[in-house]
Image (cartoon, helix red, strand yellow):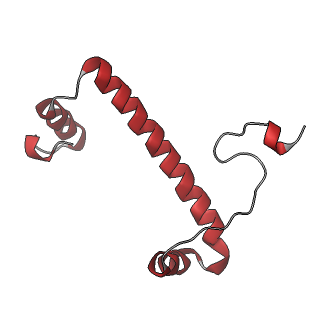
Amino acid sequence: MTDDDVEFPPGDGPTSGISVTLTAGTLRAIRERVGKRGVSAYLEKAAQRQIERDNLDELIADFDKVHGPADPEAVAAKRARMTGGTANPGSAA
């Protein structure tokens, strides 16, 4: 059985090299944060976070299909209760 035959979740499995094209500004910003030798690990973590966000977006879209979108006033009230702030429906999202 080869690695291609096994399905690994994001963050697991052996590493594999690929070519990635980034803008000069993005690459510079990454290198300033993590150094030249930390770019791959930084991109791995960024990709994992994006996959998590994509999965969450899909869950929210499925929930909205079944239950409809969230009420902005209810969201604002719950946000205020959690943060100790005041409810502001204009900032709910």
- The residue at the point 21 percent across, 29 percent down is 70
Does residue 21 sit above or below 70 in this rendering?
below
Does residue 27 sit above or below 50 in this rendering?
below
- The residue at the point 71 percent across, 40 percent down is 8
User: Which quadrant would residue 72 be assigned to in this image?
Assistant: top left
Furthest residue toward top: 66
Residue 83: % across, % down: 23, 44
- The residue at the point 61 percent across, 67 percent down is 20
- Residue toward you, 16 or 11: 16
Furthest residue toward right: 1
Does residue 77 sit above or below 17 in this rendering?
above
- The residue at the point 44 percent across, 44 percent down is 53
Residue 21: % across, % down: 57, 71
User: Which quadrant would residue 75 be assigned to in this image?
Assistant: top left
* Quarter of the image where the C terminus is located: top left
How many callouts does the rendering have?
0
Residue 85: % across, % down: 15, 45
User: Which quadrant would residue 62 be assigned to in this image?
Assistant: top left
4 on left or right of 26:
right
Residue 28: % across, % down: 50, 81
Q: Does residue 88 appear in the picture of this structure?
A: no
* Quarter of the image where the N terminus is located: top right
Q: Does residue 12 appear in the picture of this structure?
A: yes
